[in-house]
Image: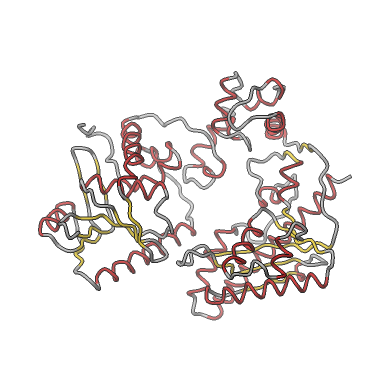
Amino acid sequence: MKNNRNAPLIKPSDAKAWSLCARRVWLDNKRDFELSLIEDEFEQLIIELGVAHEQTVLQRLSSTMTVHTTTSPENTQRLMAEGVSAIYQAKLLDEINGFVGYPDFLIRHESGEYQPADAKLSLSEEKKEIQVQLGFYRRMLGSKLPAIVFLGDGEQALIGDEATPVVNQFVTEMRKLLASDEEPTVRYSHSKCRDCPYYMHCKPAFEAKEELSLLYGVQGRAAMGLENEGINTITQLSVTDPNSISDIPYLKGSEKKQRAVLQAKAYLTGEVFQLSPVLLPKGQWVHFDIEDNPLTGNGEKHVYLWGFLVPDYNQDNFEYVWTNHGAEDKQGWLQFLAKIEQYRQQYPDLILAHYSSHERTTINTYAKRYGMENNTTVRYLLSEESPLFDMQKPVLDNLVLPLQGYGLKDICKHKDLVNFQWEDKDSGSQWSVVQFNRFLVETNPKNKGNLKADILNYNRDDVIATRKLEEWLRTNFIA
């Protein structure tokens, strides 16, 4: 197939954007407007760690073979023709098919063929964009040999013919997208769209047309199903009898349909709807939140901060367990368990309140990591009579809020709901990870202390926020 010379070249670096949103990858290649980007420090940290990982792989390869750095597609072809052992920063170009690719490495196999290889921070080669990228390089090389992935934990993985179907899908869809001069029609997804650099470009249009997928709980296929029934806008949904809506994908059953209609009303009016009484457990509440670092390089998240807010729930009542790095991981875990035993003795009717399932899941992970599933404190925390209480559950089960996301900050920062504001308005879980990684490499004691203080203040505000949420629920929704 002859390439459309006016269309941008298809490049595997588009695979991540393509896997997220067709419009995003189209805008990346076809947009003709200036994009004002807010620097994403977490993404920048990922890039820096990725470069460091790539350099580690390069050093390892260089210790066993001669690695040549290339400067152009022509230079890459020349080095391959010479049969060099390995090529770094390879550049591949196929003008006939409109392909361009930049594998981190080309490594010569004993058969004489070259295997493409990439260094990835990921701990698995099964991610869609990795399958596309490495499979695309194999296609460009016409190689039957598997591609190599140098994973973030030091392991290697291979990608072979199993990636061919998703590569073919990528090429077919990219050709269609890049040949079009019109923005593709897409649905809104709060979890994906709010982190997209084109958020402010797309969001106004979604709002103007009252796109149904703007509503929490109404996914793209559900929105399509509603449109097939003649319900095309949020306003139309808000005045629809839930019982008149057919069962459609992701919107089956009377409860989900009622919630969708109420979510539409809440979106338009700002009202809060209570579906049923909110029940909170009786006992002495201690609020609990963790901060963990997923960028450890060994495949295991490290909890660097276990934070608690104890009575009387003021800023001075913030307590915590801190560990500097992975080598102290078990020490921090054991200190956390000791802290729980302290609270257990202090408050026989302890309620350990947190928001979302993350804290419970992390405790379970740590118990397995250190073979402590039968530890007395662990069994207490994970039993049916556990003091752990997920505050997200009563919110999701009983309330419909005028929100597009039901995260802790979504609810607490809303001026007409809890109206609690974090001291650092830019702080967040990814922000905390960035600060912690800066803390690890900082050598100036004063700067190091300031970074730790900022992280502690953020976690303190997190547990104060769950306390404020508890008070808001008790004040407004408990008889």
Question: Where does the image place residue 431, in percent across and percent down from the top left?
Answer: 55, 60
Q: Residue furthest left?
A: 82
Which residue is drawn at the image coordinates 71% and 43% (left, top)? 396
Question: Where does the image place residue 179, in percent across and percent down from the top left?
Answer: 31, 31
In this rendering, the answer to whether 477 lies above or below 237 is: below
In this rendering, the answer to whether 80 lies above or below 18 is: below
The quarter of the rendered structure image containing the C terminus is top right
Question: Where does the image place residue 130, in percent across and percent down from the top left?
Answer: 37, 50
Q: Nearer the viewer, residue 343 or 378?
A: 378
Which residue is drawn at the image coordinates 24% and 61% (left, top)? 88
Question: Where does the image place residue 36, in percent across and percent down from the top left?
Answer: 45, 47
The mark total stands at 0
Q: Residue furthest bottom?
A: 445
Image quadrant assignment for residue 60: bottom left
Q: In this view, does 322 lie to the left or right of 202?
A: right
Image quadrant assignment for residue 49: bottom left
In this rendering, the answer to whether 347 lies above or below 161 is: below
Which residue is drawn at the image coordinates 57% and 34% (left, top)? 219
Image quadrant assignment for residue 99: top left
Q: Nearer the viewer, residue 46 or 31?
A: 46
Q: Is residue 70 left or right of residue 321?
A: left
The quarter of the rendered structure image containing the N terminus is top left
Q: Which residue lies furthest to the front in this view?
A: 374
